[in-house]
Image (spheres, rainbow, N blue to C red):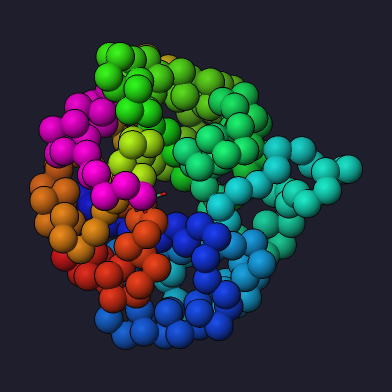
Amino acid sequence: MINYYFANFKMNMTFEDIKSYTDSLLKVVDDKKNKVGLFVPYTVLWQTKELLKDTNILVGAQNVHYEDAGAFTGEINASMLKECNCDMVLVGHSERRKYFKETNIEINKKIKQLMKHNIKVVFCIGETKQDRIQGNAKNVLCQQLSRGLSGIYENELENILIAYEPVWAIGTGETASNKLIEESICHIKEIIKDLYNSAISEKIRVIYGGSVTPQNIKTLSKIKTIHGFLIGGASLNYNNFAEIINN
Ligand code: PGA
């Protein structure tokens, strides 16, 4: 069943922007029927959560540091996010892997920290164009999942949602085909089955991200094994995000 609709605002949106955005969004979407969430910049996290406290809209951060505390100038730890009542955190987004050189090992430490603080995780994985051309996509997904989830207990997976986001589809307008997404979800489930067991693999929820728009949402929604979408560029306009949710 498709019911997760998460917006990734990336490095966009002031609190003023978010106030008018959520005001308009709540008039046109049913936040009880769907699990709607916003990944906002750190600077507006607490205020946004306060603003939305009487709604069902989830509020998340786009990153976290993997240490408990210490001399890490400019970083934010999981207890600071907890203090902001943060519901969830994006981990392993391809922009973090690419521009900030995040490794699977660091991603794994971040997931562990978040589990320790009882904060839900949207764990992003996905292959590059080159991985796909070289026939290496499944292997890359396997590495990302096995290293990222290393030491994560079966019961903790309830708090982890996998976001399959092929790197070449993010922000490019080049959405993956339904067939490719279906195949990738199938690989992800096989990998989870090998890492854990078939019951967990059946239960694990996978969402898709990569150039999702109001124009392609009808087609993408035909994928039976998908649980929702992570939307970047198109989510910056509440009308577009609402159109995607209401589809
Ligand atoms: P996009 O971004 O929708 O702009 O492709 C998705 C994401 O980065 O999560």
Magenta residue check for 178: yes
* Quarter of the figure with the C terminus: bottom left
Q: Residue at x 56, y 25 (%)?
A: 104
Q: Main secondary structure of the magenta part?
A: helix
Magenta residue check for 195: no
Find residue 226 and report its horizontal and vertical position in percent. 23, 43
Which of the pair 108/41 is nearer the observer? 41
Which of the pair 162/208 is nearer the observer? 208
Q: Residue at x 62, y 70 (%)?
A: 44
State whether residue 81 is above or below residue 129.
below
Which of the pair 174/54 is nearer the observer? 174
State whether residue 230 is above or below residue 113.
below
Find residue 93 and report its horizontal and vertical position in percent. 49, 41
Q: Residue at x 32, y 62 (%)?
A: 234
The reply to whether residue 186 is in sight is yes
Find residue 46 and report its horizontal and vertical position in percent. 65, 70
Residue 178 sits in quarter: top left
Locate residue 147 relative to residue 158 in the image: left or right.
right
The reply to whether residue 158 is in sight is no
Give the tally of numbered discs. 0
Residue 216 sits in quarter: bottom left
Q: Residue at x 28, y 76 (%)?
A: 239
Write the start and end of the magenta stretch as one range: 171-189
State whether residue 130 is above or below residue 5.
above
Find residue 148 and report its horizontal and vertical position in percent. 53, 27
